Amino acid sequence: MAKHHPSSKVVGELNRQFNQELAAAHSYLAMSVWCDQRNLKGFGQYFVKQASEERGHAERIIKHLTDRGLPVEIAAVPAPKQDFGDLLEIARQAQSQEQANTHGIHAGYEAALAAKDYAAQVLLHWFINEQVEEEDWANEMVERVRAASCAGSLGDLDRHIERYVTQEVREVPTEQ
């Protein structure tokens, strides 16, 4: 049986998404720094965790490409936005990044479907499911930050996020 060679469109989409994941990681790192500098340690920890997840997503795509002997094109990572007016602006930025990631993953999946690239489809299925969770959390974060209108309630929300991140780190085994 002849070896199936993925289309250049699928390879291009996977490389684009890989680089988009790295840019998102960079952006989450900038959000973490902003939060830490304003003593929002819970949000700072959360965004460090998100940055790590995005790097893990990029690594998953690299492994897929290299396991199949396909080219990996590592682009320059653009400097992320670092100046935010408030935490709500950061929450909206995170929401918009997750929406962009979902859009990119769907574009990659559509290319894989059109090319009948079953291996890429399976890879991207995982990402599609992951993005449902990521977008849900980003939407919830925007709503919770919007509802925390005074400094005291924002502090409570930050402590809640800190407990959430700490508890999740203890409970969730690391992905292979």
Image: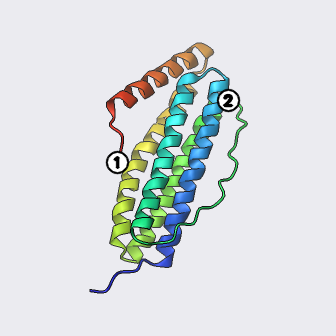
Residue 21 lies, in percent from the top left, at 53, 53
Q: Residue at the left extreme?
A: 1
* Residue at x 42% of width, y 60% of height: 63
76 or 21: nearer the viewer: 76
Above-or-below relation of 119 to 1 = above
Dot 2 amino acid type: Asp
Residue 152 lies, in percent from the top left, at 58, 13
Q: Is residue 100 left or right of residue 176?
A: right
Residue 119 lies, in percent from the top left, at 34, 68
Determine which quarter of the picture holds residue 121.
bottom left
* Residue at x 61% of width, y 45% of height: 26
Q: Which residue is mark 1?
A: 176
Q: Which residue is mark 2?
A: 86
Residue 97 lies, in percent from the top left, at 57, 48
Q: Is residue 29 visible?
A: yes
* Residue at x 50% of width, y 77% of height: 8
Dot 1 amino acid type: Gln
How packed mark 1 is, by other alpha carbons closer than 10 Å (few <14, some 14-19, many 20 or more), is few
* Residue at x 31% of width, y 86% of height: 2
Determine which quarter of the picture holds residue 88.
top right
SS assignment at label 2: loop
> Which-is-in-front pick, marks 1 and 2?
1
Q: Earlier in the sequence, mark 1 or mark 2?
A: 2
Q: Is residue 117 left or right of residue 96?
A: left
Above-or-below relation of 67 to 159 = below
Q: Is residue 88 visible?
A: no
